[in-house]
Structures are given as C-alpha cells and as structure tokens.
Image: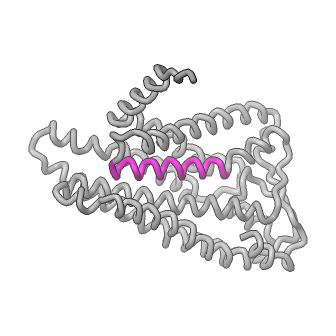
C-alpha cells in the first residue's frame, strides 16, 4: 500500500510529511486532555478486549449473536488503536509529525473500519430479525458457516472497496502549500483543506461514496428493526413482548449511538471552526467503541453472567505447584 501511494504521489508533492496540530488551540489544557483521552482509550480497550475474550472462551456465548459481538469488539479495538496512540503522543510530546504515507494509511484504515462497522451492524440486525421473526428457521439459516461468511464479507467490503477508492482519491491530490493539518488525525476534509488542487469534485465524491457504502447497510438495519418491532407488537402478552424486545435492545442502542454520532459529525452544516469539527468527529471516534462494551455487559444477562463466572474463576484460580 505504501508503495502504491508513494508511486502515485511521489512526483506530485513537494512535502514528505505532515504535522498534526492536534488540540493546539487548548495548549494550556494539553496534559488534562491527555489524561482524559488516555482514560477513555484504556477503558475502551479493556472493555472490548473483555468482550472478545468472553466470546472466545465462554461456552455459553458460542452462538451467532455473540460471535458477531466479538467481531464488533475486535473492530473497535482496531479502530481506537488507529487513532488514539498517535493523538496521545501528540498531546504529550507536542510533536505531531507523521509521514506522508502513514497519514493516508491512517485515513484509509479509519474509513475502512467505519464501512466495516456499518456492515457488521447490518449483519447483527439481520441476525436479530431471524431470531425474532423467523425463529423456526434461525438455527438452520444462521449456522456457523453463514456467520463466518457474513463477517468476512463485512470486512472484505469495508477494506477492499475503500482501498480502490482511496487510490483513486489520492491520485487527485497535490500538496504544495502547507503540511500542517489542523486536526488530531488525518481527516479527509482536513487533508483537502491544505491541498493545492481544486477539491470540490473530491468533496462531492466523498459524499457519494459514503452514500453508496454506508447508506444501504443503514437502510437494511432500519428495515430489519421495522420488521422486528412489527413482530414484537403482535405478541399478545406484555411479558412476551418485553422478553422478545430485550434480545435486541442492546444492539438497537449501539446502532443508534453509532449512526447518531456519524450524523452529528458529518450531516450537520460544516463549520470553519476547527475546534468544533474536531470535537464533533471525536463523537464517532470515541463514543461507540467506549459505549458498546458497557451497553452489552449492563443490558445483557448472558454477558453479565459470563463475566461474573470468568472473573470468579480467575480470582479462585490457584496454579498447581510443579
């Protein structure tokens, strides 16, 4: 990937590195921001890592719903690790230098992981649709092979599509004015703002690409929940309705947080104030990965039970002497 970027851009640019300015507007609060973001990153990593470990090692969670949940938590680990370490380093050392190729690789990973998460959330909503609306066919339809294929398709779609589009977009960019990016990571629009090229076409293309590869999963997720809610409302007893809806309430909340934060960041009118743009983008970068483990552990009885059992097992574990 670095070779392709270097080949395409090597003769077009006069710079070989960028400087991420981070939160330089709040220079007097750099240490405070560092500590806050460090806590967010640590909690995010621990929470998602625990979910992955529970799904892998607990026999009670060997079902499709938790297989997808483990995949989602692994994705959140990758997503947070792509942004937070460099952001924390910039806050601590005040040195935001990043190589040309690494900057575009960071943006590529961020974009691809967002697209993958859209697909994974869609797959998880389809899983809940089958469980509630087609319960008699659920076990035969959502077998282990289907789960693997759906998860692999989500990752391949996110990365393969965006890698091709990324190469095309990079071919259009020329940088010759400034190498300072007024952001804490290599954001697409922050990159366009320092390009010497005419960027209006790339801006339009970015919205078209986002609509093509994130809107269909969103609409399919929405459609799944329309059918789910319709099926739940047809259940005659209040207890039955509550039990049926509780099986998908955690996922519905996760979907709401993810798409809600994306809409706040990108669908509201764009502002020229960099600090507003930074904090709005921080919503979808930090909030979903941080909130997901808590939502699933606090609202899901099986996950709470598995967590209690495994923590108790670790506490009571005594290594045998040799």
Quadrant the C terminus occupies:
top right
From this viewpoint, which residue is outermost toward the right? 14
* Residue 170, horizontal then vertical, whole percent: 72, 74
From this viewpoint, which residue is outermost toward the front? 322
Q: Is residue 100 left or right of residue 55?
A: right
* Residue 75, horizontal then vertical, whole percent: 54, 52
Question: Residue 303 appears in which quarter of the rendering?
Answer: top left
Q: Is residue 100 above or below residue 90?
A: below
At x 81%, y 38%, the residue is 92
Is residue 280 at all visible to an observer of this figure?
Answer: no
Q: Is residue 17 left or right of residue 285?
A: right
At x 49%, y 72%, the residue is 212
Please give the range of residues in magenta: 63-82
Quadrant the N terminus occupies:
bottom right
Q: Is residue 151 left or right of residue 3?
A: left
Question: Residue 299 appears in which quarter of the rendering?
Answer: top left
- Is residue 228 covered in magenta? no
From this viewpoint, which residue is outermost toward the left? 236
Q: How is the image coloured?
A: one colour
Residue in front for this viewpoint, 221 or 302: 302
At x 40%, y 64%, the residue is 150
* Residue 157, horizontal then vertical, whole percent: 50, 69
Residue in front for this viewpoint, 269 or 24: 24
State the predominant SS element of the stretch in magenta. helix
Q: Is residue 286 above or below residue 192?
A: above
Q: Is residue 287 above or below residue 177?
A: above
Q: Is residue 302 above or below residue 116?
A: above
Residue in front for this viewpoint, 123 or 281: 123
* Residue 72, horizontal then vertical, whole percent: 48, 51
Is residue 19 at all visible to an observer of this figure?
Answer: yes
- Is residue 79 covered in magenta? yes
Total marks in image: 0
């Amino acid at each position: 990937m670095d070779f392709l970027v270097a080949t395409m851009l090597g003769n077009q640019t006069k710079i070989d590195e960028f400087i991420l300015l981070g939160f330089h507007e709040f220079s007097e609060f750099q240490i405070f921001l560092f500590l806050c973001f460090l806590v967010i990153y640590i909690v995010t990593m621990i929470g998602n890592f625990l979910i992955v470990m529970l799904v892998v090692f607990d026999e009670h969670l060997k079902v499709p719903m938790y297989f997808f949940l483990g995949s989602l938590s692994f994705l959140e680990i990758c997503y947070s690790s792509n942004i937070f370490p460099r952001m924390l380093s910039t806050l601590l050392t005040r040195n935001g230098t990043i190589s040309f190729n690494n900057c575009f690789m960071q943006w590529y990973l961020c974009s691809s992981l967002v697209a993958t998460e859209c697909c994974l959330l869609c797959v998880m909503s389809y899983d809940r649709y089958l469980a509630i609306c087609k319960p008699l066919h659920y076990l035969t339809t959502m077998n282990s092979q289907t789960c693997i294929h759906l998860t692999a398709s989500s990752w391949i779609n996110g990365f393969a599509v965006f890698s091709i589009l990324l190469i095309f977009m990079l071919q259009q960019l020329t940088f010759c004015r400034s190498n300072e990016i007024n952001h804490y990571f290599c954001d697409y629009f922050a990159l366009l703002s320092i390009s010497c090229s005419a960027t209006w076409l790339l801006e339009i293309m970015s919205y078209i690409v986002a609509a093509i590869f994130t809107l269909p999963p969103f609409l399919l997720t929405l459609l799944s929940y329309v059918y789910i809610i319709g099926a739940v409302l047809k259940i005659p007893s209040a207890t039955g309705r509550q039990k049926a809806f509780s099986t998908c309430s955690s996922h519905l909340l996760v979907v709401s947080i993810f798409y809600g934060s994306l809409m706040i960041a990108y669908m509201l009118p764009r502002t020229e104030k960099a600090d507003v743009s930074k904090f709005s983008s921080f919503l979808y970068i930090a909030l979903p990965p941080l909130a997901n483990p808590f939502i699933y552990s606090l609202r899901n009885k099986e996950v709470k039970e598995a967590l209690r059992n495994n923590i108790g097992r670790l506490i009571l574990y005594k290594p045998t002497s040799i």
